[in-house]
Image (spheres, coloured by chain):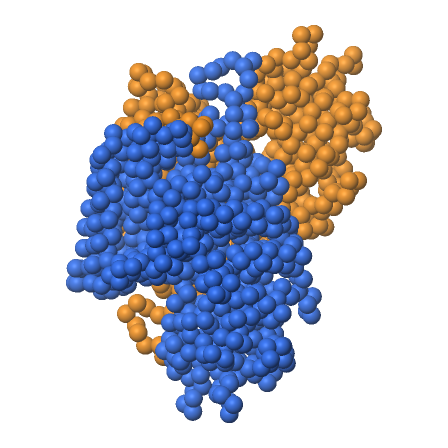
Chain colours: A blue, B orange
Amino acid sequence: MANKTLNARDVDFILYEMLDAESLTTRPRYAEHNRETFDASMATARQVAEKYFANHNRKGDENEPAFDGQKVTLIPEIKQACDAVIETGLTRAGRDYEQGGMQLPHVVGQACFAWIQAANVSSTVYAFLAQSAATVIEKFGNADQQKRFFEPMLNGRFFGTMCLTEPHAGSSLGDIRATADLQADGTYRVRANKIFISGGEHDLSENIVHLVLAKIRGPEGVEPGVKGISLFIVPKFLVNDDLTLGARNDVQLAGLFHKMGYRSSISTAMNFGEKEGAVGYLLGEPGKGLSYMFHMMNEARIAVGTGAAVLAVAGYLESVEYARNRPQGRAPDNRDPRSPMIPIAQHADVKRMLLAQKSIAEAAFALCLYSARLVDDMQTHPDEAARKDAADLLDLLTPIIKAWPSEYGPKANDLAIQIHGGSGYMREYIVEQHYRDNRLNPIHEGTNGIQSLDLLGRKLGLNGGRTFQKFLGMMQETANAALAHDETRELADALTHAVQRLGKVALFFATKRDVPPSLLMANSALFLDFMSRIVVAWIWTWQANIAARALESGSADADFYRGKLQAARYWLRWELPQTVQQAELLMSLDDTCLAMEDAWY
Amino acid sequence: MANKTLNARDVDFILYEMLDAESLTTRPRYAEHNRETFDASMATARQVAEKYFANHNRKGDENEPAFDGQKVTLIPEIKQACDAVIETGLTRAGRDYEQGGMQLPHVVGQACFAWIQAANVSSTVYAFLAQSAATVIEKFGNADQQKRFFEPMLNGRFFGTMCLTEPHAGSSLGDIRATADLQADGTYRVRANKIFISGGEHDLSENIVHLVLAKIRGPEGVEPGVKGISLFIVPKFLVNDDLTLGARNDVQLAGLFHKMGYRSSISTAMNFGEKEGAVGYLLGEPGKGLSYMFHMMNEARIAVGTGAAVLAVAGYLESVEYARNRPQGRAPDNRDPRSPMIPIAQHADVKRMLLAQKSIAEAAFALCLYSARLVDDMQTHPDEAARKDAADLLDLLTPIIKAWPSEYGPKANDLAIQIHGGSGYMREYIVEQHYRDNRLNPIHEGTNGIQSLDLLGRKLGLNGGRTFQKFLGMMQETANAALAHDETRELADALTHAVQRLGKVALFFATKRDVPPSLLMANSALFLDFMSRIVVAWIWTWQANIAARALESGSADADFYRGKLQAARYWLRWELPQTVQQAELLMSLDDTCLAMEDAWY
């Protein structure tokens, strides 16, 4: 039996009932689209996901990329999967028609991608990462770079990577040691040791275009800190003027990393310029490398959040299926051993584990698609102020969109294993792999600790706090709307109090001046969890409002909506109340962690 | 560099300062022991752990047992490890001198075992599980069974297993289908398909003695439910009267399970009696199989809790080491990129992740050793009433001792990975394996859901609730003692309120009569977490009291004690306050989960 991926009904609910994706078709860019074209795109994505990605999810886990010192070997299904997403245009879902794209709204493109991620998250890395790298060149490259690198990447001839991390510098990118020396011909010689490079070596494409962060060496050496960092295009093969491949560049695979999960995705250590220096082309202006890279970061972080979310969804669906079909034990008030066993889905504690997963998985997925919807507003909303508001709100929420699904998605996967009992611990069951795959997400694209510093240290204060205030107002509106239905009145009350609590804590941090910044920032991870729980309560109240309206209007799909209401109740009754204690702890400026001394461990 | 296992200073602290293990030497059974003999035993265990277990922890993970259809292959280090623990007597640590044992108190034996578990938890399964099986035969077997099976198991010639689970019956053992038919010679023919059998096949010992749960078939078939279950000795090879091996029994390896972790421990599917029926010998009386098995269960559950705890300890120590030696970034108030990077151990959020691990790992380990200390009192306390009290308290706490370390140990391991960043996700770092190994513990020896039903449904009401009341009193005494020191007064207050809260919730459940049992029991997992957080707060207050006294008396080891105080503060400030919301939720008899319907998922 095929593994579960997404619930199509819920995808529709989020896209059309919650995020009103159809309304985007009134915008000129999407004028040729309608719900049918959106649905057709998702159907294509789902078919490709099932045929080319789900087919080797286990096999890829069991047969990670191998390197014999000369050559990397991947299982052949990965190449077929890459070809399929390129041929169907799924890698270009959001791009212009003139680029061979489908000009789909970002939110629909993200939903398409989600089907593929849910089927096999690690095999998505190759072709889709290449498109992110391509976009950086598209945005900041000169005409020659467009032609020589962007276009072959766009059509899938070349793939690409992002080379940021070095052995001694991960979160602290200002400390990278990679250097670039200007040559007489205007090119650079790049020397760098980079690690954790996804897609660093393979034969899936004719060429691999590495985007490498490095510091330009001047007469006085390199500039310290982030300001000195520039971004370079460093291809595996140089590209001739006629776009054929030229000489092999001085780029070498140093070795592979062996991961807990995400195993079909190759993770490499790359050495640039160990011999004569790798030929590199400066992208855009010197010293702007990080800002170019971070230009892509919001979207990369949404993709991480979505990957974490859909693994949670997939595990949830697997465990529902298992729980419905696994008879074990009897109801607490039935002592007759002759009576048949009942499916474990009927045991209260299994219901708890299913409902907890549902409350995490569906909210995380909705939150990520909401953020993709913000990208659409940021890019194509007819009103300029609305475009800016969307961009700001996305900026504010990005740390939560990346961190919350990646923190709670693995918790959901943990529950999916527990429901499977001993079987869940066996690699014969896919929930075991979900758990390992999802563990990457709290780490990459900025650890969740970094996200929490970003949220508390920068994002709350965006536009003098006005973006945050506006967001509080949006959440309060949703709470107010919940007053309109009997089924949601309890949620209105809980969310209202929570929003007030969040406002109070934020104000406390914004106005507290008599303590050192290190103490204010010390419990940033707690603040991230605190605010996330409230944001998720908002997402659930939003969904519950829609469900209550649908039930009141006599929807034939009552079971689906009742499930939404119950999951909303679960989150607001079981997970939201902890924000009361969290607010107290935050406002006590507790120094327990900060005061810990090294000798005390 | 060798991987971290335990902190010897903390083992000493728990054993001698907290649990006063030396006082046990006044009991006749331990009269020949003193602190030096205890320490010598632990030193031996540690040496064996380092030489024979740590040496293949990674290798065993990378080379799980293989079955080619004919023969099982294990890496050779496992045999050497088994031989070492048998030769050094560590498998017989608690047994009588006349049995070749060391007659060590259980608490010291458990500490010895903990060193080995921390070095390589999965390779411990073979020789130590054999001893648990041996003890069942020792307690309930007849003279012939003692001679034929127990004695060769005691000295390590034979190993053994416990065969409970069947494909359709795990938690619900009353539904097993295994049968036994009495033969004219008094033996039985056993027919059974058993799964998840640890140590089911290997060539580490001459023979494998399976203890198999099955139902005796009478003229009217088998008795339904748990009452019909008997326990049988079913050896791989029959044993002749002269104790040489006889005919091969009808016991076949059906296949291996492929686990997420715990990989050097073989997990098998075993078929008994597929041909002529496997020869089995009834152990003790018919119908008492489960009670015999559960006789060992408290100790098995302590071992699971300890395994989970020491994996948390090992991961904690690894991440302390990593954090101290990994420079990255600068303090929040330092903007000078020319200044050197600081070790991540100095970042507040890393301190949080280290302190959270410490608060879990050291409390879990102390809780498990405390429970082993209760076994000593239960078995050897000079006062009969005290023996009964210890047995009852152990009964009460067993669900928490098994479930809390196994629930929070993996959370600690998760934090150890996060501290390692990208490296933590790589199999090159041991914290990755800890995370996978530890994920088994919430599942086996009774899932944590089963533990929660046991706690709320049976253990709270033990002796009409008097055992629970007495335990509340013990915790209150610890809180009172914390009033004596400036450093711990805050803890006294927090623990006192928490104990009152626990008493109030328990009284609510004990006296609530007007609701169906299914609703009372529905949130048992929440109650387990609620009570566990308070029990752990008690453990920490206990340790903090000792630390405060030591500091007041001017101990030269001040750093160690300051660390204890800080970890205690962490738990009581960060993890205990959530019990306020949990108590409210519990007493609301929330039916969110129970009311969830199958069609709503």
B312 relative to B27, above or below: below
Q: If the image is split into quadrants, where does the C terminus of chain B sit?
A: top left
Residue farthest to the right, as pictured: B247
Residue drawn at 17 percent across, 63 percent down: A513
Q: Position of residue A24 (x, y in %)?
A: 36, 52
Residue drawn at 53 percent across, 33 percent down: A321
| Left or right: where B502 falls relative to B112 | left
Q: Position of residue B285 (x, y in %)?
A: 63, 16
Using the rendered view, name the quadrant where residue A376 is placed: bottom left
Q: Position of residue B388 (x, y in %)?
A: 44, 24
Q: Is residue A80 visible?
A: yes
Q: Nearer the viewer, residue B97 or B375?
A: B375
Q: Nearer the viewer, residue A73 or B425?
A: A73
Q: Nearer the viewer, residue A541 or B233?
A: A541
Using the rendered view, name the quadrant where residue A569 is placed: top left
Residue drawn at 57 percent across, 65 percent down: A156
Q: Nearer the viewer, residue B406 or A528?
A: A528
